[in-house]
Image (cartoon, rainbow, N blue to C red):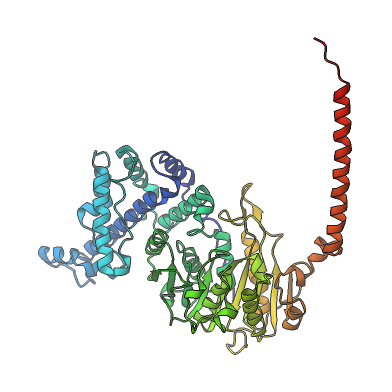
Amino acid sequence: MAKKNTPNTPPKGDIDFEKELWDVANELRGAVAENQYKDYVLSLLFVKHLSERFEIRKQEIQLSFFEPESEYYNIEAHQQSEVLEDELEYQVKNAYRLPTHATWDYLRENAEQDDIKVKVDQAFVLIDELLAKRNPDYKGVLEPIFVKSQLSPTQVAGLINLFSKEKFSEINNPESDIYGRVYEYYIGKFAMAEGSGAGQFFTPGSVVRLLVEMLEPLKGRIMDLACGSGGMFVQSLKFLQAHGGDKNDISIYGQERYEGTLRLCKMNLLLRNLSFDVKLGDSLLHDRFSGLKADYALMNPPFNISNWHPELLPDNDPRLFGAKDTFTTPGNANYMWFQTLWHHLSARGTAGVVMANGAMTTGSAGEKNVREHMITQGMVDCIVQMPDKLFLTTGIPACIFLLSKNRDGHDGEHRQRKNEILFIDARKLGTMASRRLRVFEDADVARIAETYHQWRNLGGNYTNIEGFCKAATLDEVAANNYVLSPGRYVGSEAEEDDGVPLEEKMQKLTEELMMQFDEGTILEERIKRNLATIRFNN
């Protein structure tokens, strides 16, 4: 398939607003906690989006009254009013007919009023009722949070005035994806501000792009059972658009454990005018999509969850590969995620999962049992080991597992590869964007994804590259005790490992440490003797 670039940055010449946005967010310091910025800023942004969509559709309807080809051409004034008040006329263009007190124009005109916080909350309530009327699952997307906040009316007015600027108008910049870009910017910035507390809603953009580019979700059902703020879905849409696809060809299904994060996800998807089915709940213990089969599953689940209570699973849980005691462990939920996703894959489905590096090597009984089963049954398609510092939200080294039910070569697009696993060692890729954060550049994403596609696709031109990639047989993996670390197979360990067994290294290091202790003792005695010889003069 000919690829188009899925850009890492906004189009050249597009609107630049990043510093201004973050400066405004900083004005909230002291009034609200940093981990609550998004609740206020993104909610206002969402209202602005809905209001502009309403205005755009309203103008379209009004113009139709003067277009001879329109069914509403030259109708009477009272009929025009009826059409303009008909909710279905807005729904067909994925817009909502907003009452006056819920429009952005009303909030802007009243921004300097002392009761602006009350007016904003009232607008939120009105819009939330409209959303719930359209779809009950949208209930609670907007909560009235301004009155009870410590924000001053002046601060709220500042936010409203900022988003009222022309550069933030979808009407004036229809091709710039203004709201989507602002939303993503704040999600990323809030992740930096929150640190490890942001993990439930944020996956680095370059990692999401890599997953999507590898899986190529152009048509079918897309699932994320730890969907956070919906980044996997949005990137899938961008990939689809970059390749000339139609968003009506994809269906979106997600589950998220945290209600506040799910609210962000719904707003994010509504901003993109996507239809979706995302539900609240713990995917491990309460699978809300038990019968659904997805063509693509993308997920960055929380790593290494302990005490997740597998004893609460029914003994006949259809996700399990076998007996519950054999294929689960209370100490770590990583491999329950794999079993859950495998259960949800369609006959042609492929899953991409971001996982802690420990999952590639763990010897814990329940986890190793699952890993051996996945390998021997031909479920594992590819392993990508990633460099450090890709994640602001965790210091745990990470990798990507690709699992696929589409490895028999019967689909006419991909070759038969059930007896192989592709290993890619990407630890040397990426660029430091800051002291704390590394990102995959477009060239890095393209190199990894293209390597996978050349290996997987019929007619591909794949070649093993020393230190980077290797297609290993299942027998080779079995000979390595079912360890899935790419370094075992691609040859990079030859560079990084001096060949000395660990036991010998430890013995040598221990001997050197003892010698240093002895030298330290001698030095300490020498210092004491020198101090004893010093005479102090009054």
In the rendered image, which quarter contains the C terminus? top right
Q: Residue at x 57, y 64 (%)?
A: 303
When the figure is inspected, residue 332 is found, relative to residue 344, above or below; the finding is above
Whether residue 460 is visible to the viewer of this picture, yes or no, is yes
The image shows residue 178 at horizontal and vertical percentages of 42, 55
The furthest residue to the top:
538
In the rendered image, which quarter contains the N terminus? bottom right
The furthest residue to the bottom:
410
When the figure is inspected, residue 406 is found, relative to residue 129, above or below; the finding is below
Image side of residue 256 versus residue 474, left or right: left
Image side of residue 77 versus residue 449, left or right: left
Image side of residue 360 versus residue 217, left or right: right
Residue 248 image-quadrant placement: bottom left
Image side of residue 299 versus residue 265, left or right: right
Residue 157 image-quadrant placement: top left
Q: Residue at x 10, y 64 (%)?
A: 78
The image shows residue 335 at horizontal and vertical percentages of 58, 73
Report how many numbered discs are placed on residues in the image: 0
